[in-house]
Image (spheres, rainbow, N blue to C red):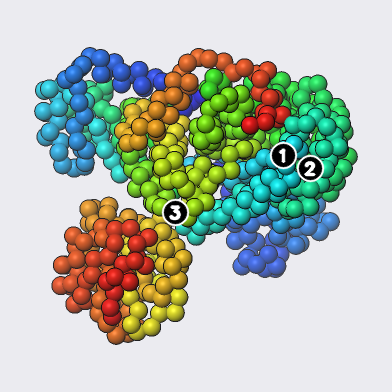
């Protein structure tokens, strides 16, 4: 692999570099105060250069192109599907999340086949679309449907792709190595821009033709052979295909080390050595766990598939194809993906102060929690989902959770008493009763002394607040 | 691959430490800054290994290790950089450990120690134990998978020693680490079978 160096690293890029190329009109059409403010947001990847209307004019074409090149991510961003549900794969700037932040969380596709009974296909689509979990202010969802040709029959595949695309707007992955079958599938969804799986050393020319004809992205596949994979990407690129996804193969059990190694080496080559041919999104197939399953229980395979998926989310996969569609096996990975893709540049604390839930009145309960983001969002989502009318005082505990805040003296009775005064809660409720987190029971006496409020020790986990209120709350 | 090979190097170091001390070896409790340093005399005298525990802050980890060097050899220290559960701060724990391991491999001697994880903390996540609506059940599988996911994420960051709770989670972690160091190669020709598999 020969690398092309010279692109400025994401951290070395300064707002001045960007500002120099902007039209410098200070017109505010982008919504920012001036061009320098816009440039700063560009460098932090909070806005896109396409949001600067003057830059899109003919006279700035050269600067626009220079900026595009300057801001180009190490991993190309590939769009699959059309419309609102289209997913962006890749677009990564760095290898490690602490170097900047990751973009475009790993897309998860659930499979159907052209030999499944129609009801089952529809059921799997519905459960994929319905998957939804609220987690600290985010809604976790699944992203795509992979249609596999298991029959080897082009007409069957075509009919299934047609049925699937009539029943979902989720982007598709069409899975077959036979270009005739692939074409039949594409004819059933000609404008849907599915991801075509896959071109390999044997079929690449026919598959590349289809990708060009239907304007869809394509997966280059070379199991456990990185040199061949990069050669294949080069070949496809030379043929005119721009949107490529790389599949180095996924191996459960034996070959797990090769799998993690291949993903890591590809991402390393792209981010650290500037190897452009490795700079495409990576596809992982945790569903290989199902191959040759024999008489193993389905739960065992789902478990294996799930942890393989988890490792691939951590190690650079941009899209995953999975068969197990149970909530218990998907939820840990949906949360893991959210964690890995959380912006490490954002503070771990929320603003302290008074938060209002529902429409509380002068008799409504008053709680407090700390300003550690995870703690706050957990409590907030429990109060929201139980549709309670309540006040929540967010105490500045320097971003600590309740238990560690109490232990480390970051959450003190003084701070709680201060917050009662500064939030003005005393003018909003008639009673003087504060429900404190169960894990802060140690400081309950001190809070009573300092604030003059009566303290009620609440549950240790905020999920039990509704039950607690029924049993223990009286204004 | 940096993370895995790094873990192997330091795991060997840890095993040597164990072999030399045999049954005598144990870990002292959490050694927090600034107290408890005097206990190091005891650790040293009895040939124990110390766990240097810091709350997710690499500067503190370096500082505590520096203080421990006055009492203990480098091979007598295992770092615990604090484990947060999947969904409840795992991102901080993961990145902190990944940075520590990369730092250690790149020559930061104060971070070049094996790492330990209190992975049982995974169970602090309510999704690991809470009875939820039927689409997320059974929790008997969801819970241990929560611990496995926490463990494997940190394994990839370089953790060498896991303290865990659920037997199924322990078994999976052992299976995976065994696979990763087995030297067995992928069977490239069988990979495409997934496309037409009929599970």
**Protein chain holding label 3:** B
Q: Quadrant of residue A59?
A: bottom right
Write down the residue under mark 1. Answer: A116
Is residue B113 positioned above or below A337 on the image?
Answer: above
Query: At 30% across and 44% down in the image, what residue appears?
Result: B55
In this view, the mark in front (1 or 2): 1
**Protein chain holding label 2:** A
Query: At 21% across and 76% down in the image, what residue appears?
Result: A453
Say left or right for B78 vs A47. left
In what element is the residue under mark 2? helix
Query: At 16% across and 67% down in the image, what residue appears?
Result: A446
Write down the residue under mark 2. Answer: A160
Q: Quadrant of residue A288?
A: top right
The answer to whether one can see residue B144 in this image is yes
Q: Dot 2, crowdedness within 10 Å: few (<14), some or many (≥20)? A: many
**Protein chain holding label 1:** A
Location of residue A321 in the rendering, given as x and y in whole percent from the top left corner: 64, 37
Whether pointer 1 and pointer 2 mark residues with C-beta atoms closer than 8 Å, the reply is: yes
Write down the residue under mark 3. Answer: B132
Is residue A327 positioned above or below A457 on the image?
Answer: above
Say left or right for A1 vs A216. left
In what element is the residue under mark 1? loop
Location of residue B38 in the rendering, given as x and y in whole percent from the top left corner: 11, 34
How far, Cα to Cα, is label 2 from label 3? 34 Å
């Amino acid at each position: 692999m020969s690398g092309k160096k010279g692109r400025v690293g994401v951290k070395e890029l300064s707002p001045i570099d960007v500002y120099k190329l902007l039209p410098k009109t200070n017109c505010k059409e982008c919504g920012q105060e001036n061009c320098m403010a816009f440039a700063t947001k560009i460098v932090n990847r909070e806005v896109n250069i396409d949001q600067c209307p003057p830059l899109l004019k003919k006279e700035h074409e050269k600067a626009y192109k220079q900026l595009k090149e300057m801001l180009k991510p190490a991993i190309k961003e590939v769009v699959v599907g059309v419309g609102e549900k289209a997913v962006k794969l890749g677009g990564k700037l760095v290898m490690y999340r602490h170097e900047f932040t990751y973009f475009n969380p790993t897309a998860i596709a659930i499979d159907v086949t052209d030999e499944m009974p129609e009801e089952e296909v529809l059921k799997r689509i519905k459960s994929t679309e319905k998957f939804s979990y609220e987690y600290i202010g985010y809604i976790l969802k699944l992203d795509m449907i992979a249609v596999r040709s298991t029959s080897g029959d082009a007409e069957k595949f075509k009919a299934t792709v047609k049925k699937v695309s009539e029943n979902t707007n989720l982007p598709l992955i069409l899975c077959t190595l036979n270009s005739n079958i692939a074409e039949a599938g594409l004819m059933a969804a000609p404008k849907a821009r599915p991801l075509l799986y896959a071109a390999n050393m044997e079929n690449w020319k026919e598959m590349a033709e289809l990708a060009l004809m239907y304007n869809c992205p394509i997966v280059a596949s070379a199991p456990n052979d990185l040199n061949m994979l990069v050669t294949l990407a080069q070949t496809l690129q030379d043929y005119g295909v721009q949107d490529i996804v790389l599949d180095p193969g996924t191996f459960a059990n034996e070959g797990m080390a090769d799998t993690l190694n291949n993903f890591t080496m590809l991402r390393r080559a792209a981010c650290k050595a500037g190897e452009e041919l490795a700079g495409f999104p990576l596809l992982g197939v945790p569903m290989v766990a199902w191959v040759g399953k024999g008489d193993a229980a389905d739960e065992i395979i789902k478990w294996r598939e799930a942890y393989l998926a988890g490792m691939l989310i951590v190690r650079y996969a941009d899209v995953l194809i999975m068969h197990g569609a149970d909530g218990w096996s998907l939820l840990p990975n949906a949360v893991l993906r959210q964690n890995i893709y959380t912006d490490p540049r954002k503070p771990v604390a929320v603003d302290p102060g008074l938060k209002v839930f529902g429409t509380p009145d002068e008799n409504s309960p008053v709680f407090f929690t700390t300003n550690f983001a995870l703690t706050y969002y957990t409590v907030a989502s429990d109060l929201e989902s139980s549709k309670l009318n309540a006040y929540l005082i967010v105490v500045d505990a320097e971003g600590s959770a309740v238990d560690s805040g109490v232990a480390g003296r970051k959450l003190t009775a003084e701070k709680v008493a201060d917050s009662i005064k500064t939030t003005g809660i005393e003018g909003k409720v008639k009673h003087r009763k504060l429900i404190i987190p169960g894990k802060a029971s140690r400081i309950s006496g001190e809070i009573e002394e300092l604030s003059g409020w009566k303290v009620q020790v609440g549950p240790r986990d905020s999920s039990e607040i509704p039950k607690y209120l029924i049993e223990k709350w009286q204004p | 691959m940096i993370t895995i090979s790094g873990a192997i190097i330091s795991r060997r170091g840890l095993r040597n430490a164990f072999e030399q001390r045999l049954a005598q070896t144990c870990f002292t409790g959490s050694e927090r800054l600034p107290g408890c340093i005097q206990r190091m005399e005891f650790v040293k005298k009895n040939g124990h290994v110390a766990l240097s525990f810091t709350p997710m802050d690499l500067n503190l980890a370096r500082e505590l290790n520096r203080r421990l060097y006055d009492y203990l050899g480098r091979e007598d220290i295992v770092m615990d950089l604090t484990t947060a559960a999947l969904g409840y701060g795992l991102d901080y724990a993961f990145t902190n450990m990944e940075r520590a391991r990369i730092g250690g491999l790149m020559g930061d001697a104060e971070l070049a120690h094996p790492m330990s994880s209190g992975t049982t903390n995974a169970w602090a996540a309510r999704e690991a134990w809470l009875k939820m609506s039927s689409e997320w059940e059974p929790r008997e599988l969801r819970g241990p998978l929560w611990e496995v996911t926490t463990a494997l994420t940190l394994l990839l960051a370089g953790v060498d020693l896991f303290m865990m709770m659920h037997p199924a989670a322990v078994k999976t972690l052992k299976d995976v680490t065994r696979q990763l160091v087995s030297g067995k190669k992928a069977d490239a020709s069988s990979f495409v079978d997934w496309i037409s598999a009929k599970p």
